[in-house]
Image (cartoon, grey):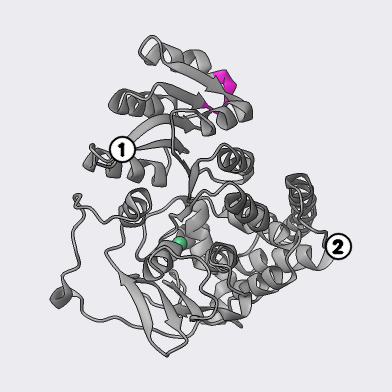
């Protein structure tokens, strides 16, 4: 008999964390949530702790500790700050750590979890984009699995039946992209796109940062770099195809000319459930596709000239070292500036290109060198955004 998978949820109150709670609730004999961590949403975190009976709860913002304590059953252990995240990621009574923290705060806890022998379910793109080399090497050394939660990578993981590598059999990984809300917008009109328009995603309901990234195609760029590390495939064999219906979540083209695809509804519970039950497939509450009601599935080439994020990602992934961190950090700053009305929509990739051009690439052999490059890129990008704001 299989023992329950005992899961730590880092980022439990966000969009992925909420879906993971639903998957665990659907499969109570398979998945047990033993610990939860959130940034500052005390009420939702306390509610989740009551639902799951989690005995360890971390709140990143230490000023929220007493408010949280008042809402939790007596005897619940409460941790705070970055140290609290790392401690909760290395608990003796957990097998798997699911990381879905926006930004770079998940890096250290993810590495610590691997070093403590935990399988890592990765939803935070930053972990593999910034530290893919370190994370995959550590996973190999400690013989733990890295389970992708991002829908595209989970689709590829399913097509490969969980096997990493297979260099000789795989000819290409093909990531699908919805194309976002501006897929058909003339290039000249991109200049006038507003944050409200960019936040209106056609197929997926997600957090604001990733929704803007879907509109610019930076999300797909980050995913190209993620795929490079997750599957040990060169950037030259990672392609993107636009698929507006978001039903085919990604594909693997094999050397014999066959292509396998994974299809399902647009619900993050699908990849989360597969990651947490792998290598098994179990019946939860997720509904299969109803093919006769799907009008059509379309595919088209991405507009790489009008949306330069994919080419910038390829450049960052090929160069490696600290450049992917710079690509990621500059984009984060540019998205914030765009949302605040201080940068145009095309200004986002102009900011990233400018910051990448100014960067002296270093080897990314330690988390410290990666974090240093991240800080540098944020300052550099903020300078670009200030200059741009002055001219709006
Ligand atoms: Mg994705």
Whole-percent x, y for residue 65 in the image: 52, 17
**Residue depicted at 46% across the width and 80% down the height:** 241
Point out the frontmost of discs 1 and 2. Answer: 1
Kind of element beneath mark 1? loop
Disc 1: which residue: 4
**Residue depicted at 26% across the width and 56% down the height:** 281
Crowdedness near tag 2: few (<14), some (14–19) or many (≥20) residues, C-alpha within 10 Å: few
Question: Where does the magenta region start and end?
Answer: 59-63
Q: Is residue 311 magenta?
A: no
Q: Is residue 390 left or right of residue 280?
A: right
Q: Give the image quadrant in which the ligand numbered 1 is located.
A: bottom left
Q: Earlier in the sequence, mark 1 or mark 2?
A: 1
Q: Quadrant of the C terminus?
A: bottom right
> Label 1 vs label 2: CA separation?
47 Å
**Residue depicted at 37% across the width and 25% down the height:** 54
Which of the numbered marks, if any, corresponds to residue 350? none
Q: Is residue 85 left or right of residue 250?
A: right
Q: Is residue 25 left or right of residue 41?
A: left
Return the residue nearer the eye: 234 or 127.
Answer: 234
Q: Is residue 35 visible?
A: yes
Whole-percent x, y for residue 233 in the image: 58, 72
Disc 2: which residue: 360
Q: Residue furthest top?
A: 74
Kind of element beneath mark 2? loop
Whole-percent x, y for residue 311 in the image: 64, 77
Residue 80 lies in quadrant: top right
Whole-percent x, y for residue 131 in the image: 66, 53
Residue 43 lies in quadrant: top left
The vertical placement of 175 against 327, above or below, is below
């Amino acid at each position: 008999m299989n023992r329950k998978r005992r899961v730590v949820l880092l980022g439990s109150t966000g969009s992925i964390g909420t879906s993971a709670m639903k998957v665990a609730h659907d499969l109570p004999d398979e998945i047990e949530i033993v610990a939860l961590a959130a940034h500052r949403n005390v009420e939702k975190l306390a509610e989740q702790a009551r639902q799951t009976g989690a005995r360890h709860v971390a709140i990143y913002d230490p000023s929220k500790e007493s408010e949280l304590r008042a809402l939790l059953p007596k005897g619940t252990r409460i941790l705070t700050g970055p140290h609290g995240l790392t401690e909760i990621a290395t608990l003796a009574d957990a097998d798997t750590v699911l990381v879905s923290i926006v930004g770079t705060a998940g890096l250290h806890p993810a590495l610590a979890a691997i070093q403590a022998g935990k399988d890592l379910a990765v939803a935070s793109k930053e972990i593999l984009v910034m530290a893919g080399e370190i994370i995959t090497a550590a996973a190999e050394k400690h013989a733990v699995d890295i389970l992708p939660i991002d829908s595209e990578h989970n689709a590829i993981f399913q097509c490969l039946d969980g096997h990493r590598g297979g260099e000789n059999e795989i000819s290409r990984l093909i990531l699908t992209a919805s194309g976002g809300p501006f897929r058909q917008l003339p290039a000249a009109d991109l200049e006038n796109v507003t944050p409200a328009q960019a936040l209106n995603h056609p197929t997926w309901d997600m957090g604001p940062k990733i929704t803007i990234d879907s509109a610019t195609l930076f999300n797909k760029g980050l995913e190209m770099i993620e795929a490079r590390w997750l599957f040990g495939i060169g950037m030259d064999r990672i392609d993107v195809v636009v698929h507006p219906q978001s039903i085919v979540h990604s594909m693997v083209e094999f050397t014999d000319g066959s292509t396998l695809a994974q299809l399902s509804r647009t619900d993050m519970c699908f990849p989360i459930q597969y990651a947490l039950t792998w290598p098994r497939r179990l019946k939860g509450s997720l509904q299969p596709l109803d093919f006769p009601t799907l009008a059509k599935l379309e595919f088209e080439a991405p507009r790489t000239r009008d949306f330069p994020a994919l080419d910038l990602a390829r450049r960052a992934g090929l160069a490696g070292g600290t450049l992917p961190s710079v690509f990621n950090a500059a984009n984060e700053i540019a998205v914030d500036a765009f949302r605040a009305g201080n940068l145009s929509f095309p200004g986002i990739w102009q900011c990233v290109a400018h910051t990448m051009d100014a960067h002296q690439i270093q080897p990314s052999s330690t988390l410290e060198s990666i974090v240093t490059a991240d800080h540098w890129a944020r300052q550099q990008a903020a300078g670009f955004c200030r200059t741009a704001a002055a001219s709006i």
